[in-house]
Amino acid sequence: LEYVDNGQMKMRPAVELSYLNEIEQQDLVDAISECDATPNLSQACRLKKKSQGEGLTPESIGEIMDNTNVEISVENMPVRGKFLGNTVEEIEMIQEATGCSLTIDTGHGNTCGNLEEMLSLKNISYCHLNDNDGVKDQHITLGEGTLDLNLLKKIDTAIIELNNFDNILKSKEVIDNL
């Protein structure tokens, strides 16, 4: 928790790492000191999975920590006939099969009518914030569509995903006033 308290690690990776046994946690602290980096969510999930399987060694911790600082994330998709990932079940299946973290797009969830459920999933890295009419993926200013703005209170980390600077500022104001 010291890494969370001092801002070096986000809470979600720390929760995943809490499942490591005491020896593995100490080996991880040593690895963090050696590489001067803390695990991102994707790395934390891989560490937990390996711990619960064959177990972690200092070598396997190092391989996961040195592998990459790029976090791979799967995004939920809007309602369209051929899109995969517009139901909670599909997103959970993809996440489980790949070990990737999740990106939740509020507009996509709004078109599917399942945003609240999507925001309750585990291993969300961040969210894309935008609004729409609940039918089409429009990426409009927050508050100008049918998105339940109260759901934004459940979000920790996000980007405002709009293509107009003025609309980004308007959306930021909406968020600030929640």
Image (cartoon, grey):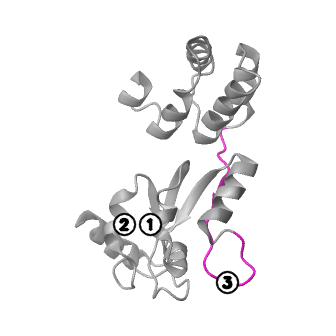
Q: Which residue is mark 3?
A: 80
Residue 58 falls in image quadrant: top right
Q: Which residues are magenta?
A: 69-84
- The Cα–Cα distance between marks 3 and 2, rounded to whole angstroms, is 23 Å
Describe residue 26's horizontal placement relative to residue 9 as left or right.
right
Mark 1 and mark 2 residues within 8 Å of each other at the beta carbon: yes
Please tell me whether residue 80 is drawn above or below residue 18 in the rendered image: below
Query: Which image quadrant: the C terminus?
Result: bottom left
- Residue 75 shown in magenta: yes
In the rendered image, residue 39, in percent from the top left (x then y), is placed at 59, 32
The secondary element bearing badge 1 is classed as helix
Q: What amino acid type should be assigned to the residue bearing mark 1?
A: Glu
The secondary element bearing badge 2 is classed as helix
Query: Which image quadrant: the N terminus?
Result: top left
- Circle 2 crowding by C-alpha within 10 Å: few under 14, some 14–19, many from 20: few
Disc nearest the viewer among 1 and 3: 1
Describe residue 66's horizontal placement relative to residue 138 as left or right.
right
In the rendered image, residue 66, in percent from the top left (x then y), is placed at 71, 28
- Residue 128 shown in magenta: no
